[in-house]
Amino acid sequence: MLRVRAARRDDIDEFVKLADAAGTGFTSLAVGRDELAARLETSLSAFGSDHGAPAELVYQLMLEDTESGAVLGCSAVKDAVGLSKPYYDFKIVTLAQSSKEAGRRFDMHVMLLVNDFAGDTEVGTLFVGEKARGLGAGRLVAQSRYLLIATDYGRFGPNVLSELRGVVREDGSSPFFDHVTRPFFKMTFEEADQMSASSDNQFILDLMPKFPIYLEILPEAARDVIGKTHKHGIGARKLLEWEGMRFNGYVDVFDGGPLMSVPTREARTGRESRLLAVGSGSGEIEALVSTNRFEDFRVVRTRVGFEDDFLLLDGEAQSALDVTSGETVRLWSAE
């Protein structure tokens, strides 16, 4: 059975393997072992905390095969971004150009460096290894994040957002970075990627231009990838759209990938979920079931049944969730 659970300290070796497999351009995993180990420690503190409001905590989730114990994927939820560490993006703005004398009226588009999402919640770092692809694992991991958020909405920001990986060439370079960002940074895409993941992002404010960048004067290679998703992220984008997220003209400053967002309580999985008491049994309805607690948070996809006001779970599902009859769990089902 596949299970999503709160990360543990002993996940470090598998976490490093996942980061290596993700490759260049996966900004949130473009860090070394020490940084990944620090994230696990931070996540342990977050899951064990009792904060009632966003506090810049990071909840790291791991996808696990309960039979083998192998870690097959990961994701994370940051309860608030853009506070102590700015969350920079480019915002695309439309400017109306007109001249009575020239008899011309047309629109032009510019990019502005902004920190518009301060205090909002971010879901990201969604990566599933090859062994788990094609098994519905990506959807399981993705939806688990919103079940975590629904456990206590008060801990999270007013909007949930996600940055998707932009277009990157086979050699790991980025056409957007080459033509837009590199002239100001004087470093490679990989160097900038790693610095962004491991620093407070002050270097972005220091080096980025303070004036609008007109899209119309950029080379076609750069314009063509603005707001576009990397081929490996198309499935992730569809999952975000299914949750209700929309692209509103914000793009990543490095690869031009889209930023998508939705009001937190309107994210579909959390909005459609409900609480039920556990009963022992089985059923034929496929569903996601999560624990209703932060500490040792867990989610499984399993078949369930209903009897009176109880959600029937078989022994394997109860064991995977570490729950017993009478405990409250959260259910999401398409039926």
Image (tube, helix red, strand yellow):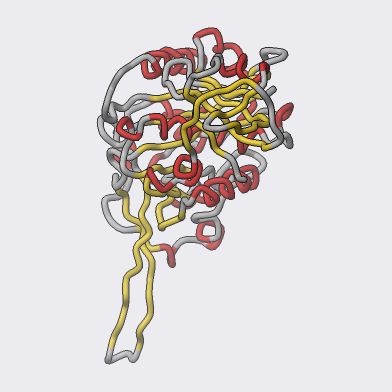
Q: What's the residue at 43%, 29% (across, down)?
A: 197
Q: Is residue 99 above or below residue 17?
A: below
The quarter of the picture where residue 169 lies is: top right
Count of numbered circles on the image: 0
Is residue 130 among the parts visible in the rendering?
yes
Indicate the quadrant containing the C terminus: top left, top right, bottom left or bottom right: top right
Q: Where is 100 relative to 199, above or below?
A: below
> Is any atom of residue 182 visible in this view?
no
Relative side of 234 to 58, left or right: right
The residue at the point 49 percent across, 30 percent down is 276
Q: State the image quarter where residue 100 is shown.
A: bottom left
Q: Nearer the viewer, residue 74 or 282?
A: 282
Nearer-the-camera pick, 100 or 145: 145
Residue 264 coordinates in the image, percent (x, y) = 38, 43
User: Along the horizontal axis of the image, is 189 left or right of 121?
Assistant: right
- Give residue 181's position: percent from left, percent from top: 42, 46
Measured from the top left, where is residue 81 in percent x and y?
33, 35
Residue toward you, 288 or 53: 288
User: If the image is split into quadrants, where does the N terminus sit?
Assistant: top right
Q: Which residue is at 51% across, 47% downward? A: 243
The residue sitting at 49% across, 44% down in the picture is 272
Q: Position of residue 292 (x, y in %)?
A: 45, 24
Residue placed farthest to the front in the image? 308
